[in-house]
Amino acid sequence: MQLDPLGDLKRTHTCGELRAGDAGARVTVLGWVQRRRDLGQLIFLDLRDRSGLVQVVTNKEKNAAAHARADQCRPEFVVGVEGTVARREKANPNLETGEIEVAAERLYLLNEARTPPFPIEGEITASEETRLRHRYLDLRRPPLQRKLRLRHRVTLALRRALDEQGFYEIETPFLTRSTPEGARDYLAPSRVHPGHFYALPQSPQLFKQLLMIAGFDRYFQIVRCFRDEDLRADRQPEFTQLDLEMAFATPDQVFAVIEGVMQRGFAAADQQHIETPFPRLTHAQALARYGTDKPDTRFGMELVDVSAVFETARQALRIELPVHALVVPGAASASRSQLDAFADFVKAQKGRALYHAKVTDTSIESALEKTLASRGLEWLQELAGARPGDLILAVPSDPAQAAGEPHAPTTTVIGALRLHVAQQRKLIPEGKWNFLWVTEFPLFEWSPTENRWVSSHHPFTSPADEDMEKLESDPGKVRSKAYDLVLNGWELGSGSVRIHRQDIQQRIFRVLGLSEAEARERFGFFLEALAYGTPPHGGIALGLDRIIALLAGETSLREVIAFPKTAQAQDLMADAPALPSLVQLIKELQIFPRDTLPSRCENTQCTAEIWIWQAFFHPKYPGPTKPVKCLFCGNVVGKPLGTPFVVAAQREQEWREETVT
RNA sequence: GGGGACGUAGUUCAGUUGGCUAGAACGCUGCCCUGUCACGGCAGAGGUCGCGGGUUCGAGUCCCGUCGUCCCCGCCA
């Protein structure tokens, strides 16, 4: 196909901006062919760029050359059109540009396109897998263009707001060292220091604290973070944080900054005004009232402790106290199968049991009737605050949960049920932005697997001043100066006032079971820095992808990240991660994968060093066996192997590599 | 690491109790068409039923394994 050069063709208008007022203007538009309607003597092209669509028309009688070009056009061809804007005889009300069209005088075919695997339109039915394999085409679709535009605008607004508040944006290293606790690290091997690895940061935590020590007073960064953990719809292996830190800051000051910044970000997303200050709950209150540390407060259904009602029935039911209940408004008519589904949900959450009571105008129906003390159901209704037509659900504390750890929450199962039921019955109102600060997180949690205390936030979080003396004697009771920002039940981010004194930092490491030598080896630089006049400081990090996803009305972060990874942490388009070159591993990095043992070519003329690597294919299904040959002299080395395998060989300064399949 | 759902033309799907020479829609290709805008009409091409094994006279269908996608639990300071 004969293609045209761009030459000095210059765009005068974007596709989406032309209006009736432009009628008569000579314009040049450039874009992709969305659709072609060929009527023989007339061809209509819908031309698309990121701004929108405009109809182009060619007429065989009036302009045969342009018409011939249009005849060759197919979807997603890239074309330029010089022509005159004309009012249409019959406008198309579905199109912003529907009152006009561009009558083509010259049509430039700038590039052709293969038929795309899915149409480049707003609503498509293609699977996410197909979309991810051709992400560049998916991104061409208007919904993705809108979401990334939204992301740009919000990000820009956050940057501006922070700049106005005196924050400096400062970059911190990606090639750094592993921090303790927390998620698994992604590692990057060092060529210059064989056997040594950088860790990609899970967050810039230590660096931002060092920037406070360095006197920058207010720092922020919109920064990528890396965590090698299993993924969810709201978790990507690399994700973006709005990270900030302030010297001499109290939690209230951090909250005020974030509240202002969020107002600006949401305004940039054309959202309604957000009321500040955001409500606050302590961690203990959140668990007691909602059974989670990230409550969705857009709906009620708060938890009620109804242990008193179950006191006498405890043995008969073989349950542990406390028992918590919640009221599902208007759900007394719930069917047997619905209630069974709720019970299955509780079971899946490792809950002990689910009891229910249907409140009607005249009575309360429940299997508990004979088990509870007389008038027990009425008591339950009164405590729970249920009205006729409502359904009461009650879940006892799980005995293992209660026995395992004295401070373990007892409401998480019913908290999960609260959310599940509300989603199921569509009781969550749309269009609300319920921000919430959750404060006073416990400083430590007991880890039964590691048999030690671990930081519930991170080891640099300051204990609450009044709990300081319990640090060693009763670590589980120590509250921290850590806080979370929650929006509509999503954890948007966590922050804390940090430890700024070396002595306290060392006490924390001790409680965590980190020996002094170990602490010095891993954070010597940081502990030393603390000793040089560290100001009190605190900050927070917000998940930018989550903020954008909520603003875009999406539940998956993949929808607001240009090139996201799958739940298995793969990039289906680039096919990453991929096997490295064996020579790169051995020669540059001196990393020897499992099952690669060096041997020597037995040909006395050759004596090349040879490595064979076959660890990556599934040993259960090897391909045909093939001989292993020296890559220099062709001499057969050892026994034949099941394919595929990789052979690397070195003779003097030369390296060779071959994959045998 | 565990549980669940899914995998059949380019795409989205249908495919009964195992009988298939595997269908539909959209898309694609060719021809016709001067006012279309989900244009229309006619004709046509297009399949390793994810992959590997097994049961069977016979497997898209049943069994085992494996790979991949999605959701959830564990995990994620």
Image (cartoon, coloured by chain):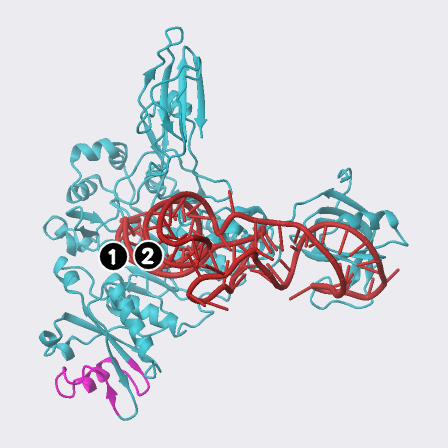
Q: Are the residues at dot 2 and dot 1 in contact (C-beta closer than 8 Å)?
A: yes
Q: Residue A484 carries which label?
A: 2
Residue placed under numbered mark 1 in the picture: A441
Chain letter of the residue beneath label 2 in the structure image: A
Q: In this view, does A311 lie to the left or right of A286?
A: left
Label 2 and label 1: CA atoms lie apart by: 9 Å
Q: Residue A5, position in %: x, y?
A: 76, 37
Whether residue A151 appears in magenta in the rendering, the answer is no
Q: Chain A appears what colour?
A: cyan
Identify the magenta region.
A363-391
Q: In this view, does A545 lie to the left or right of A406?
A: right
Q: Chain B appears what colour?
A: red
Chain letter of the residue beneath label 1 in the structure image: A
Please tell me whether mark 2 sits on a helix, a strand or a loop. strand
From the viewer's side, name the closer residue of A265 and A392: A392
Q: Do callouts 2 and 1 point to residues on the same chain?
A: yes
| Residue type marked 2 | Asp
Q: Residue A369, position in %: x, y?
A: 18, 85
Residue drawn at (17%, 32%) of the image: A517
